[in-house]
Amino acid sequence: MTFTIFSITCFALVASALGCGVPAIKPQTIGSKIVNGQNAISGSWPWQVSLQLPSGFHFCGGSLINQNWVLTAAHCAVVVGYHRVIFGEHNHGSSVEPIQVKLVSKVIPHPLYSRATFNNDIALLKLSSPVTLTPRISPVCLAPSTINILPGTRCFTTGWGRTATTRVWSLVGSVSWGRNTCDTRFPAVYASISQLRSWIDRTIASN
């Protein structure tokens, strides 16, 4: 299955430090397929990861935030030493893509995550070993806690939201839930990175 811009994470173009959020391969952000989305250019979202069963079945997405950590949804329930983290993948059916595969050594869900309400639906995955950064694999910037994403900000699904102010991408939301029918009458729901940023920083620093 080719990676398509499709409910995974929410991003915005905002000012940030050089070194994250700058794809070596420029993504295409205009299209009209899959509820105003389009097929992604291979390698153009280099922080996007695929969480998979040992069989290769994709069950959740995530975002690389540095060489040792991936951010995903807590409801994905990643299991240490069992689930695989795939980097650099575009087409799930391809056997020739230059992917990297890592296991997870630690899973840290947000302490206030609620299965009932999906509040704080976020988790940090510590990789078994650092991923090697390449033009197809690089981290995204994290939105600062002070960021203000205005209502009406244009979004396009795979969960990338954007405001065209710079050419640096920052993660502003991690997908929590939404209608699997892609019904545009209903909102998609994201965990706010700015609201959870202090927890992310504290957790990474102490682990």
Image: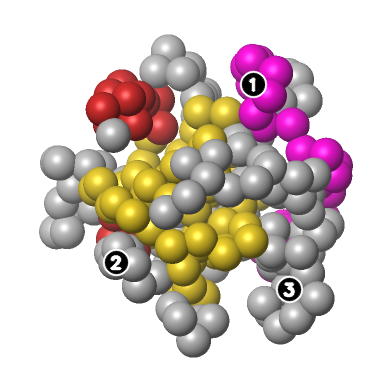
Residue at 48% across, 50% down: 129
Placement of 82 over or under 21, stated as above or below:
below
Describe the element under mark 3 as helix, strand or loop.
loop
> What is the CA distance from the residue labelled 1 to the residue labelled 3?
28 Å
The foreground one among 65 and 9 is 65
Range of magenta residues:
12-38
Q: Position of residue 190 (x, y in %)?
A: 41, 46
Outermost residue toward the front in this view = 129
Q: Mark 3 = which residue?
A: 91
For the question of whether residue 4 can be seen, the reply is no
Task: Give whichever of discs 1 and 3 has the lower sequence position.
Answer: 1
Q: CA distance from mark 2 to mark 3?
A: 24 Å
Instruction: Give the x, y percent position of residue 175.
Output: 44, 51
User: Which is in the foreground here, disc 1 or disc 2?
Assistant: 2
Dominant secondary structure of the residues highlighted in magenta in the image: loop
Name the residue that disc number 2 marks: 79
Classify mark 2: helix, strand or loop.
loop
Foreground of the two, 89 or 163:
89
Question: Tag on residue 14?
Answer: 1
